[in-house]
Image (spheres, grey):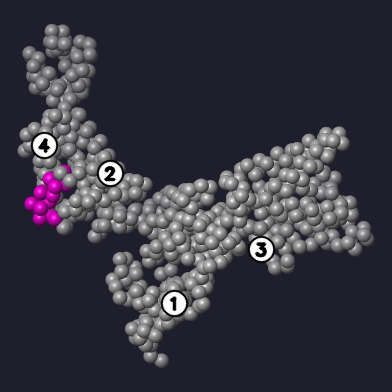
Amino acid sequence: MQIPSLELQIQTLPDNPGVYQYYDKDGKILYVGKAKNLKKRVSSYFNKIHDTRKTNVLVKKIITIKHIVVPTETDALLLENNLIKSLQPRYNVLLRDDKSYPWICIKKEPFSRIFLTRRMIKDGSEYFGPYTNFKMVYTILDLIKELYPLRTCNYDLSESNINSGKFKVCLEYHIGNCKGPCEGLEPLEEYQRQVNAIREILKGNFKESLKDFRKLMNTYAQNLQFEEAQKIKEKIEILENYQSRSTIINPKITNIDVFSIVSDESAAYVNFLQISHGSIIRSHTLEMKKKLDESDEELLELAIVELRERFQLLSKEIIVPFELDLGENIKITVPQLGDKKQILDLSIRNAKFYRIEQLKQLQIVDPDRHVNRIMAQMQKDLRLPTEPRHIECFDNSNIQGTNPVAACVVFKDGKPSKKDYRHFNVKTVEGPDDFASMTEIVYRRYKRLLDENEPLPQLIIIDGGKGQLSAALKSIDELGLRGKIAIIGIAKRLEELFYPGDSIPLYLDKKSETLKVIQQLRNEAHRFGITFHRDKRSKAALNSSVESIPGIGEKTMLTLIKHFKSVKRLKLATEKEISEVIGASKAKKIVEFYKINP
């Protein structure tokens, strides 16, 4: 059967909400997406040139479009999530870390056992979780063990088995960790009351347990059972300590899920916090690999659906950093201040820390991928035609016009290439004219690279504002390099980035990696230039001082310069120290000269 043309396939799409699927010529799934209006959304792929190369490549590969119509956009979101996980299309976001997590199970049986498991069995048992790390699970289980003596055996403690005397108490009973329900030494009602209290603790509600323990402690104290009262007091302290470590917001905020997102050029990191009775009872960060430059809104919607399904979340309210459409059954809150804003900020902070941790690991394990990511990010942030693999930065140094020098530092793949650093003595400029100095050194640098057929950088950074940038551009134009090399200026005060012909500066996020690389270049150029300028100034001062000493020639002068580095150090040197360098007779002349001319 002949496949209809794409134009015909698009024209016959409905205007309803649904999920669309793109296939290539071999019938292989390329992409799954959801839409409020299928026809409008799919048409948008084909009626424009996209900003990213990947999207343009995707569009060229599409041969067949399939769709599924659903009643609402919420249904489309759920269906999209399921299809992505089952079909794993090449151009869809990768949902990382889909492993099995631990749960805490309250077994449906007489005298319920409470234990850790990775498997959910649909036998009526209750499961709390999943938890994202074992440490938290063990902490909670240790807390429960400290508070309530429950059985750990797997006997079938039916009423008939207990009455028949089938079981005998074990060591756990004798050391006080169990009250012996297997021999009928503990009533079922009393045991289940403890299980109910544990169920509330697992939900994050410590209030009832603390209330019961305090009541029991007072009863023991009134009956003069002080040892028993002390044991209950210790349990209260354990519970309060655990609660204080987990409670971070207003206890009235309960049964709410918090989602936040932090993204860069290649990935997004979505943090999720589950809040119950003012406590964080679960936290998880999901990494999502971008495929088609998806927006934060799209990624967060997808992640929320995935996480709610994975963790079986049923809360009716969620806190997010911006408005989303997740259907009428979920209340969306975008807090601006107060306790809910604090918990959202905490979630964002968790996402940022997770991203930093992942990037550090990536930098160690796969440095090439780390460099590629930074280069791609810089190209996007600075609106460059190519990745700035080779960057050069210029800085001037002079004090009241004396000893004018300049420095050029070179970064390759985002790192200093010190063997390519260059110093410049300004030759054609008289007086403190930084603009003219910049024009001279930029011309000399790139005239030489052109003459020697050396590779040119993709980006030039000028340390200075519009004036310095304009001065550098004169040389770039004279050499015919305008349009062949990108050039920007950075002003120190507000870290403004200036572009040729644009009076409005670009401001990057103060925490962006692109700005950090630019600042590192600028600071390195400043350091390199200042060091050279100081050395030159010191040598000039030493020269002028030494040349005026009768009987001291040029060769001796150079020896002194090399050894003492500065006039001050030469003046402070003893005659013996100087004589060790240039001999006794010349040393005597220098010491006598500085006695007369201190």
Q: CA distance from mark 2 to mark 1?
A: 45 Å
Q: Where does the N terminus fall, quadrant-wise?
A: bottom left
Q: Please, what secondary structure does the residue beneath circle 1 have?
A: strand
Say whether residue 479 is magenta.
yes
Location of mark 3 (residue):
119
Query: Mark 4 or mark 1, which is nearer the start of the sequence?
Result: 1
Name the main secondary structure of what is drawn in magenta: helix
Location of mark 1 (residue):
20
Residue count near mark 4 (Cα–Cα under 10 Å), binned few <14, some 14–19, many ≥20:
some
Q: CA distance from mark 3 to mark 2?
A: 54 Å
Work out whether residue 505 or residue 234 is closer to the camera in this orientation and state it: 505
25 sits left or right of 430 in the view: right
Q: Please, what secondary structure does the residue beneath circle 2 have?
A: loop
- Residue type for callout 1: Tyr
- Residue type for callout 2: Glu
- Residue at the location (84% across, 55% down)? 189
- Residue type for callout 3: Arg
Answer whether residue 382 is visible to the viewer in this image: yes
Q: Please, what secondary structure does the residue beneath circle 3 have?
A: loop
- Residue at the location (13% across, 25% down)? 540
Location of mark 4 (residue):
433
Picture disc at residue 495: 2
